[in-house]
């Protein structure tokens, strides 16, 4: 995962540079989650989260000098680059999981083989 994150960071840095925008790096908001906390305290039902294995990262998508959507799509394209090889949680799932059911709150990448359909 660390190699994948570094490749993702390098690709994003390259794209920002090409666009003439400053890049402050990836801002990780959640990486490893203790399975007990994940299930019993955070109330999350999935037992298949890659966060429990330290193979997933959530990233902040706002405050990068572009809209959340623009940054999210840049990340998605970079995550699917062969050098990164990550699964990328689809926009619809992120929006559906937000408190109002429509906000793009973050981006989630993880490493598993194969990725779920559409990731
Ligand atoms: Zn996540």
Image (cartoon, grey):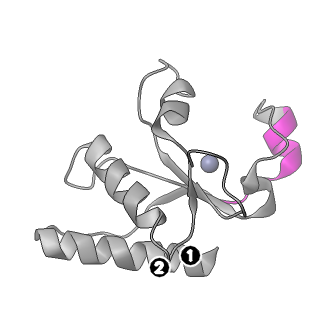
Residue at the disc numbered 1: 4
Residue at the disc numbered 2: 7
31 left or right, relative to 96? right
Residue beneath the point at 52% across and 21% down? 99
| Tag count | 2
Residue 94 image position (x, y, % from top left) = 52, 35
Label pair 2/1, CB-CB below 8 angstroms:
yes
| Quarter-of-image position of residue 55 | bottom right
Residue 36 image position (x, y, % from top left) = 89, 45
Vertical comparison of 53 with 46: above or below? below
119 left or right, relative to 19? right
Please, what is the dominant secondary structure of the magenta stretch?
helix
Q: Nearer the viewer, residue 26 or 85?
A: 85
Q: Nearer the viewer, residue 17 or 31?
A: 17
Vertical comparison of 83 with 72: above or below? below
Task: Label 1, secondary structure: give it.
Answer: helix
Q: Which residues are magenta?
A: 31-40
Vertical comparison of 81 with 96: above or below? below
How far apart marks 2 and 1 lie (CA) works out to 5 Å
Vertical comparison of 109 with 39: above or below? below
Q: Is residue 73 magenta?
A: no
Residue beneath the point at 30% across and 42% down? 69
Task: Label 2, secondary structure: give it.
Answer: helix
- Residue positioned most to the left: 20
């Amino acid at each position: 995962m660390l190699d994948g994150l570094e490749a993702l960071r390098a690709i994003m840095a390259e794209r920002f540079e090409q666009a003439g925008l400053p890049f402050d790096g990836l801002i990780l908001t959640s990486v490893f989650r203790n399975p007990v906390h994940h299930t019993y305290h955070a109330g999350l039902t999935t037992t298949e989260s890659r966060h429990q294995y330290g193979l997933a990262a959530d990233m902040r998508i706002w405050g990068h000098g572009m809209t959340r959507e623009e940054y999210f799509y840049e990340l998605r394209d970079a995550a699917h680059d062969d050098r990164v090889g990550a699964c990328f949680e689809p926009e619809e799932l992120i929006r559906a999981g937000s408190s109002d059911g429509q906000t793009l709150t973050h981006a989630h990448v993880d490493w598993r083989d194969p990725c779920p359909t559409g990731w």
